[in-house]
Amino acid sequence: MNLLRRKLFKAISFYSFLLFFPIKSLYASSKKIINKKLSKEQKDIMFNQGTERAFTSSLLNEKRKGTYHCANCGALLFDSVAKYDSGTGWPSFTEAVPGAFNTKVDYSFGMKRIEYHCATCGAHHGHVFADGPGNTGKRFCNNGLCLIFKPSE
Ligand SMILES: [Zn+2]
């Protein structure tokens, strides 16, 4: 009887390991720090839903042609043709590269907003609003610290 119980216990522990392992690894792969050189502020924004102070980003006045990439994983997120000055104090874009982001509804601060995060690494980047100019009508309001700009020339 004791032996049977022990065997059963062993079997349960073995199978529960199988059950939890994929869930844990899936979660880890959906949100993870890849760039070990991220600053404290970058980690706070990208992994704790923080926001950089308005008008502090060095990318606000960036007007060169090029591409914008995720500061954590390097994924291509925006083309400079989509960038515009929204006057809000954060780098703003009318459209993202297709498939670059996933979104979710964010109810923090008593507002209903659409949060978006990198589809590759899960890092939070900003919120998307429906008051943008141009054909898309969208305004991607992105924390500058989450972006790496690569000029094309
Ligand atoms: Zn990323």
Image (cartoon, grey):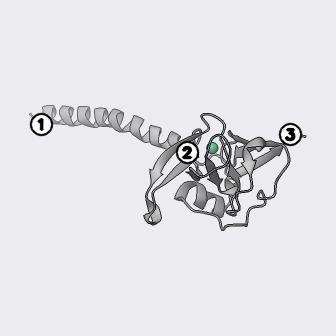
Q: Which residue is mark 3?
A: 152
Q: Is mark 1 within 8 Å of ligand 1?
A: no
Residue 55 sits above or below residue 93 on the image: below
Query: Residue at the spot x=51%, y=44% of the render?
Result: 103
Q: Nearer the viewer, mark 1 or mark 2?
A: 2
Q: Which residue is mark 1?
A: 2
Callout 1 amino acid: Asn
Q: Quadrant of the N terminus?
A: top left
Task: Tell me the SS state at disc 2.
Answer: loop
Residue 140 sits above or below residue 6 on the image: below
Mark sitting on residue 122: 2
Query: Residue at the spot x=68%, y=44% of the render?
Result: 134
Q: CA distance from mark 2 to mark 3?
A: 26 Å
Callout 2 amino acid: Gly
Q: Is mark 2 within 8 Å of ligand 1?
A: yes
Occupied quadrant, residue 121: top right
In depth, the one of 137 and 99 nearer the eye is 137
Q: Position of residue 136 (x, y in %)?
A: 63, 41
Mark sitting on residue 110: none
Is 146 placed left or right of 113 in the picture? right
Which callout, 2 or 3, points at the residue further toward the start of the chain? 2
Which callout, 1 or 3, points at the residue further toward the start of the chain? 1
Q: Position of residue 149 (x, y in %)?
A: 78, 48
